Image: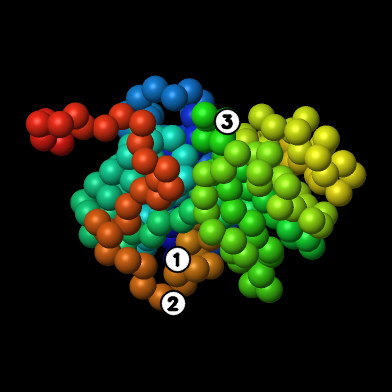
Amino acid sequence: MNILALDSATPACSVAVLSGGNVLAECFSAGQKNHTEKLLKLVDAALSQADAAGEDIDLVAVSVGPGTFTGLRSGISTAQGLAFAWEKPLAGVSSLEILAFQAGPFPGLICPMIDARKQQVYTCRYRMGSNGIPEKCSDERAVAPEQYLAEIQEPAVFIGNGALCYRGLIEDVLGDSARVMPDVLSLPRASTVGCIADRSYSGGTPPGTFQVQPAYIRPPDAKVGKGRKGM
């Protein structure tokens, strides 16, 4: 299966092309502005590097959050547009699951943390499944890191920009039982989006293109005021 995967859930964005579970190309861009414009350029670059075109893609996959509201909207709308134009199915993948996958085959608790600002993190607890895909053992939520860490009672690995932001707190609370993954692994990667989608949907059918929606967890800060119609 040939997969075009996109991620823009955090300040960085990336696009990857995979075939048969192997990464043929992956392109990155850092910075929070113009995600949509950057993604389209990265799509062109990744397809060119992989010597592929839209008609060669069997599945489009995209990270659905939690993450930055603007980034999620940009990534999902871009993925929907490509899937619709190419008449291909679209799969959504949790940003926290992506990070948990990138933590590797850790035998204990895997704790991805994405900085949610307002002194909170988006997080969820995972354990690695026998099929190589992380399995949830708690709900996704936005929570104060102090409250979250007080619930951890066993060795755990922490990954994500939220884990880096609160590294000192994690080490103070959990000591030697905690391991914080390095920053090179702390941003979701489009190649990981594609790997999870490949394992999850090979032989199966993902949801319809426009059924894939952002997983905000916490309501957006910017809301449409009373008496105004949303655009």
Residue indicated by mark 3: 119
Question: Does residue 111 appear in the picture of this structure?
Answer: yes
Q: Report x, y in % for residue 68.
A: 44, 35
The mark closer to the camera, 2 or 3, is: 3
* Label 2 Cα crowd, 10 Å radius (few <14 / some 14-19 / many 20+): few
Tag count in the figure?
Answer: 3
Sort mark 1 into few (<14), some (14-19) or many (20+) by Cα contacts within 10 Å: some
Q: Residue at x 48, y 23 (%)?
A: 31
Residue 1's disc is 1
Characterize the local packing of mark 3: few (<14), some (14-19) or many (20 or more) Cα atoms within 10 angstroms: few
Which residue shows up at 68% across the image and 39% down it?
146
- Asked if disc 2 and disc 3 are in contact, CB closer than 8 Å, the reply is no
**Looking at the image, is mark 3 or mark 1 earlier in the sequence?**
1
Any part of residue 57 in sight: no
Residue 151: image location, x then y, percent? 71, 52
State whether residue 34 is above or below residue 172: above
| Rendered position, 128 above or below 4 | below
Place residue 229 in its image quadrant. Answer: top left
Q: Earlier in the sequence, mark 2 or mark 3?
A: 3
Numbered circle sitting on residue 220: none
Amino acid type at mark 3 = Gln
Question: What's the residue type where badge 1 is placed?
Answer: Met
The foreground one among 22 and 182 is: 182
Which residue was labeled with disc 2?
A: 203
* Residue in view at x 43 percent, y 60 percent: 2
What is the distance, in whole Å, between disc 2 and disc 3 at their CAs? 42 Å
Numbered disc 3: secondary structure: loop
Q: Given this view, does label 1 or label 2 mark the residue nearer the observer?
A: 2
Report, in whole angstroms, how far the alpha carbon at label 3 lies from the one at label 1.
41 Å
Dot 1 or dot 2: first in sequence order is: 1
Q: Residue furthest right?
A: 176
**Which scheme is used to colour this image of the protein?**
rainbow
